Amino acid sequence: MQRTSFDRWSCPTQKAVELIGDKWTLFLIREFIFGQKIMGFNEMLRALKPISSRTLALKLQKLEGYQILRREVLNKKPLRVQYSLTEKGKSLENCMKDLAQWYKNNNLS
């Protein structure tokens, strides 16, 4: 019987979990998919309370770097930054819904 290689550089499931599977990153994506489609930094802080502003900033940078989130600076006074999902980020919607449905279908609550 051939074993599946779970080498961190070859397993797509492991790569996906490493990218979005931590608590705050998954919750952040959830807020955009099931909540508001466009949010500012402070709105996200309130939605994800008790996340720290430093942790949120790091998660936003990571998701922006992987082109899952889009950061837009508005030329209003005071200067405002808003975030939204890119098409790549929006493509996670079915995964998130399937995960929630799996939980409900298996009576894990």
Image (tube, grey):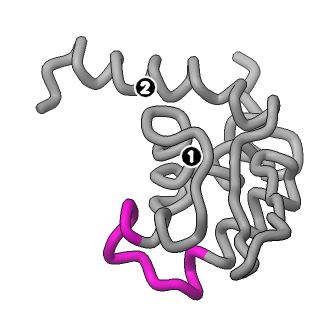
Position of 1 relative to 24 (above/below): above
Q: State the residue at coordinates (75%, 57%).
A: 63
61 up-or-down from 27: above or below? below
Q: Quadrant of residue 90?
A: top right
* Amino acid at pointer 2: Leu
Which secondary structure lies at badge 2?
A: helix
| Residue at x 52%, y 50% (from the top left corner) | 26
The C terminus sits in image quarter: top left
In the rendered structure, does residue 52 fall within the stretch colored magenta? yes
Q: Position of residue 100 (x, y in %)?
A: 36, 25
In this picture, residue 32 sits left or right of residue 4 = left
Extent of the magenta region: 46-56
Q: Which residue is mark 2?
A: 99
In the image, residue 63 above or below residue 76: above
User: Which of the 4 image quadrants contains residue 107?
Assistant: top left
| Residue named by callout 1 | 29
Picture coordinates of residue 17, whole percent (x, y): 63, 47
Q: Residue 98 at x, y = what percent?
A: 46, 18
Residue 60 lies in the magenta stretch: no
Label 1 Cα neighbours within 10 Å, binned few <14 / some 14-19 / many ≥20: many
Of residues 24 and 2, the one nearer the viewer is: 24
Taking the spot 78% from the left edge, 46% from the top edge, the residue there is: 68
Observer-nearest residue: 83 or 104?
Answer: 83
Q: Residue at x 73, y 79 (%)?
A: 77
What amino acid is found at the position of numbered circle 1 in the picture?
A: Ile
Image vertical order of residue 10 relative to residue 45, above or below: above
Q: Kindly report the distance in space between the C-alpha atoms of the residues bearing marks 1 and 2.
A: 13 Å
